[in-house]
Amino acid sequence: MELEFFTPKDKLDEKQQKEVADFLYDHLDEFGDDYQAIMRCLVFAMDDKSKFGGSVLVSREEGKITGAVVINKTGMGGYIPENILVYIAVHRDYRGKGLGKELMLKIFEKTDGNIKLHVEHNNPARFLYEKLGFTSKYLEMRYENKK
């Protein structure tokens, strides 16, 4: 397996962004977002003109994407974690074999600062996150402004 790590300095080109977005859209299943949201997240992660940006980790086997992780910087270090893990997906054929854990450990190694994530209660990946040390410090509540 090959791992590729991208930051705004060595960014994904448009073709690679589309490939990663296609993969995430297909393999996030019911826990994913619409395609345009995934693309906006990737563009944000690769933005080298702001103080934020982020990173993308991709695993491949024989050229085929088997997993992907997208981290965005929050710009709020000190009172909110410096990073948010926005997306992680493992190809259906590779689930249950430790790839998700391997990707998480590699992204921990490559990322400076604390990392937060949002996970739905019924997402089976939640148990992996807890085993890796993520805790539920807060209950997230949202107000959707209809303006």
Image (cartoon, rainbow, N blue to C red):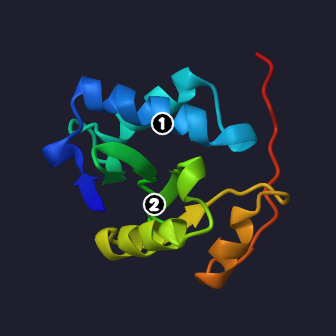
Pick whichever, 88 or 50, lies toward us: 88
Identify residue type, mark 1.
Phe
Q: Position of residue 27 (x, y in %)?
A: 59, 41
Judged left or right of residue 122, residue 110 is left
Decide: is 22 above or below 123: above
Q: CA distance from mark 1 to mark 2?
A: 22 Å
Q: Residues within 10 Å of mark 1 (few under 14, many from 20)?
A: some
Q: Position of residue 109 (x, y in %)?
A: 33, 76
Identify residue type, mark 2.
Asn
Judging by the rendered image, the residue that carries numbered circle 2 is 83
Q: Position of residue 69 (x, y in %)?
A: 45, 53
Which type of secondary structure does the marked residue at label 1 adopt?
helix
The disc placed on residue 23 is 1
Identify the residue at image location x=49%, y=67%: 99
Decide: is 31 above or below 126: above
Identify the residue at image location x=82%, y=38%: 143
